[in-house]
Image (cartoon, helix red, strand yellow):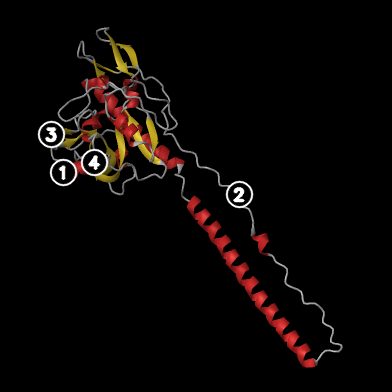
């Protein structure tokens, strides 16, 4: 992760801080005095959107259904028995009526099939692409969470544990968020006051004011390996290539320490669910990706682990380094 060099105005010590620490009040590890380093202007990365494919123009093939009606030859009634003549005329009319009925049925069936095909194509296209505004809004919320993680790591020198005294990592990073307000003092995640104090960035895609879809992976070789306070510097695969936060299909109470348990030998849990194109993932360096649902599970497992150094490639992105 890129670091900025700043100088403590109190003791003049030179410090290296993550770029995301700019503009945040920190405490100098040398003299223990607080100060605020200058913010570095950096563009916020956007979630990668999968552009919808254009629908091909449908050809009108209904012209093939136009058929010429059989024509009855003009009959000569000279020297012909009237009974035979009228019998022939009646038989010809019957044949014409039958042919006309068959053609009408064919035309109607063909027309209905064409209408049904177009209707199905239109309905399949409608809503098949996510609203870019909603995707950008969700990515912006996730970006704020990633910034809070980086601020926590810069000031505490490690990331929070997924479960700290019965509270989730979400509660622990709140003091490092821009919109932070004082949380109720409680060590019980089910405390109603604490639940109702959820910051809005955790409410992306939820229907109530106490739940969240943002989770992390816990377990062996993950950033949040149980019982360890991991720092960003200890991510061997690189912060740009390791998932920190991911979108889950089912909301959980935001203050509850409930996350995904990663096991490299078992199938991954279902991810995303809100968007049709893929699920949002926040990488440890602070950028956000929209990862397609059909991404190879082997690749996903490689970018969930903090170590291993295997080469992986996400669709539309550069190969991951050794």
Label 4 sits on residue: 254
Q: Quadrant of residue 263?
A: top left
Labels 3 and 1 touching (C-beta < 8 A): no
| Nearest the eye: 248 or 309 | 309
For disc 2, the marked residue is 57
Residue 191's tag is: 1
Based on the displayed image, in which of its 4 quarters is residue 283 positioned? Answer: top left
Helix, strand or loop status at disc 2: loop
Picture coordinates of residue 239, whole percent (x, y): 32, 23
Residue 199: x %, y % from top left: 28, 38
> Farthest residue in the top direction?
12
Mark 2 vs 1: CB contact within 8 A: no
3 and 4 marks in contact (CB < 8 Å): no
Residue at (27, 22) in percent of width and height: 235
Whether residue 178 is visible: no
Q: Is residue 95 left or right of residue 136?
A: right
């Amino acid at each position: 992760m890129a670091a900025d060099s700043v100088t403590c105005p109190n003791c003049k010590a030179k410090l290296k801080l993550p770029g995301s620490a700019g503009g945040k009040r920190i405490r100098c590890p040398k003299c223990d005095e607080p100060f605020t380093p200058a913010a570095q202007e950096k563009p916020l990365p956007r979630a990668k959107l999968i552009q919808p494919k254009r629908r091909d123009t449908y050809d009108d093939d209904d012209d093939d259904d136009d058929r010429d009606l059989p024509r009855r030859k003009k009959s000569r009634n000279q020297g012909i028995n009237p009974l035979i003549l009228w019998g022939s005329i009646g038989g010809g009319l019957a044949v014409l009526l039958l042919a006309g009925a068959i053609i009408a049925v064919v035309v109607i069936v063909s027309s209905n099939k064409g209408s049904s095909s177009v209707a199905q194509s239109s309905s399949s296209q409608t809503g098949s692409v996510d609203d870019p505004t909603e995707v950008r809004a969700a990515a912006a919320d996730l970006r704020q969470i990633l910034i809070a993680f980086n601020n926590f790591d810069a000031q505490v020198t490690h990331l929070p544990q997924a479960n700290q005294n019965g509270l989730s990592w979400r509660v622990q990073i709140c003091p490092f968020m821009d919109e932070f307000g004082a949380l109720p003092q409680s060590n019980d995640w089910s405390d109603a006051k604490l639940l109702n104090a959820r910051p809005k960035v955790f409410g992306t895609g939820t229907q109530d004011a106490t739940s969240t879809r943002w989770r992390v992976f816990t377990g062996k070789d993950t950033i949040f390996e149980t019982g360890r306070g991991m720092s960003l510097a200890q991510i061997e695969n690189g912060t740009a290539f390791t998932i920190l936060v991911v979108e889950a299909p089912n909301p959980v109470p935001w203050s509850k320490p409930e996350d995904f348990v990663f096991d490299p030998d078992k199938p991954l849990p279902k991810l995303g669910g809100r968007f049709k194109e893929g699920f949002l993932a926040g990488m440890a360096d602070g950028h956000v990706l929209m990862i397609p649902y059909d991404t190879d599970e082997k690749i996903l497992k490689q970018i969930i682990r903090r170590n291993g150094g295997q080469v992986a490639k996400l669709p539309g992105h550069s190969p991951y380094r050794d």
